[in-house]
């Protein structure tokens, strides 16, 4: 979670250090029902073990990346030779770039799950739609992305996909 003036919240930690962090501007700019949606979303990350799953995913990616870096630098003396470091950095960077669409798809899956769990807990599709529209109006988030932006930078589902999910939830759960 970086520096931003956009309203935001996040889940962090493992085990007894788990926390939900809420930016003050989220509390200032959004209605109580909208804030409850955001909190339910972040608590869903914790209850579903998403942080541990992300760590496991990154560890899973690290194994083939380290293997490829080791094999690639072998002709330059291997990873123990300082002369091979620039090549190793290049290989690791290239592999992370190649893996980015998979990383983003995994992240979007976890975010979608947290959105759904938040809706199941709050049962408030109107507030859900409102908070996502608020991210566009007050947080300067783009409402939709092209397919290549979704692959390259989409760690969360687009706002339009999230609103469509709230509408789908409403259809499955009539009042």
Image (spheres, rainbow, N blue to C red):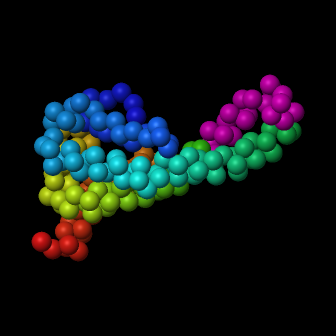
Depth check: give the residue in front, 48 or 113. 48
77 sits to left or right of 112:
right
Q: Residue at x 22, y 58 (%)?
A: 122
| Residue at the image position 20 percent from the left and 55 percent from the top | 128
Residue 143 located left or right of residue 88: left
Q: Nearer the viewer, residue 14 or 125?
A: 14
Question: Residue drawn 69% across and 40% down?
Answer: 91
**Is residue 61 highlighted in magenta?**
no
Residue 80 on the magenta span: yes
Q: Nearer the viewer, residue 68 or 163?
A: 163
Residue 142 seen in this snapshot: no
Magenta-drawn stretch, dominant element (helix, strand or loop)? helix
Side of 37 relative to 99 (left or right): left
Q: Residue 112, image x and y in percent? A: 36, 58
Instruction: Give the position of the N terminus as an image quadrant.
Output: top left
Task: Pick the quarter of the image with the C terminus.
Answer: bottom left
> Residue 68: where, in percent of width, then height?
74, 47
Relative image position of residue 72 (x, y in whole percent):
78, 43
When the figure is inspected, residue 110 is found, relative to residue 17, above or below; the finding is below
The stretch of residues the image draws in magenta is: 76-95
């Amino acid at each position: 979670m970086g520096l931003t003036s956009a309203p935001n919240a996040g889940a962090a930690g493992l085990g007894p250090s788990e926390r939900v962090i809420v930016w003050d501007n989220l509390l200032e700019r959004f209605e109580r029902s909208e804030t409850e949606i955001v909190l339910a979303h972040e608590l869903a990350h914790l209850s579903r073990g998403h942080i541990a799953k992300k760590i496991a995913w990154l560890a899973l990616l690290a194994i083939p990346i380290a293997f490829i870096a080791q094999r690639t630098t072998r002709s330059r003396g291997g990873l123990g030779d300082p002369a091979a470091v620039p090549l190793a950095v290049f290989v690791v960077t290239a592999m992370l770039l190649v893996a980015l669409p998979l990383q983003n798809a995994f992240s979007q899956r976890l975010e979608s799950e947290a959105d759904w769990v938040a809706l199941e807990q709050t049962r408030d599709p109107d507030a859900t739609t409102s908070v996502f529209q608020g991210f566009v109006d007050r947080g300067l988030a783009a409402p939709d992305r092209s397919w290549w932006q979704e692959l390259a930078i989409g760690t969360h589902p687009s706002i339009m996909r999230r609103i469509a999910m709230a509408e789908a939830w409403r259809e499955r759960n009539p009042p």
